[in-house]
Amino acid sequence: IPNHVAIKIALELKKLLVDNSLLDV
């Protein structure tokens, strides 16, 4: 996986985790 693609995926996953955490609270 190209580095920039891996970073983009990581940021998307992080955003999803943050969104889920905010919804859970």
Image (cartoon, helix red, strand yellow):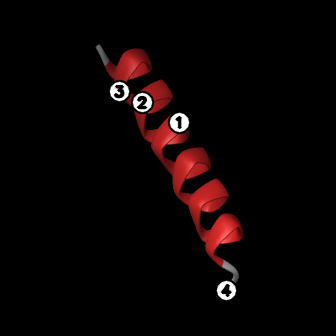
Left/right placement of residue 14 relative to residue 21 reads right
- Marks 2 and 1: in contact by CB < 8 Å? yes
- What's the mark number on residue 24? none
Image-based side of 24 in relation to 13, left or right: left
Per the rendering, the mark at residue 1 is: 4
Alpha carbon of mark 2 to alpha carbon of mark 3: how far?
5 Å
Task: Tell me the distance, in whole angstroms, between the alpha carbons under discs 4 and 3.
Answer: 28 Å
Foreground mark, 4 or 3, reads: 4
Residue 2 image point, x, y percent:
70, 81
Position of the N terminus by quadrant: bottom right
Q: Tell me if residue 10 comes above or below residue 2 in the rendering.
A: above
List x then y, in percent, for residue 18: 42, 30
Amino acid found under the numbered disc labelled 4: Ile
Q: Is residue 7 above or below residue 17?
A: below
> Label 4 vs label 2: CA separation?
24 Å
- Where does residue 21 sit, x and y in percent of width and height? 35, 27
Image quadrant in which you'd find residue 3: bottom right
N-terminal of the pair, mark 4 or mark 1, is 4
Mark 2 secondary-structure assignment: helix
* CB within 8 Å, label 2 to label 3: yes
Name which residue lies at 52% across and 57% down: 10
> Residue tagged by mark 2?
18
The numbered disc on residue 21 is 3
Q: Circle 4: is it few (<14), some (14-19), or many (20+) Cα within 10 Å?
A: few
Mark 4–mark 1 CB contact (< 8 Å): no
What residue does disc 1 label?
Answer: 15
Residue at the spot 61% in from the left edge and 47% down from the top edge:
12
**How far is mark 4 from mark 1, CA to CA?**
20 Å
Q: Amino acid at mark 1?
A: Lys
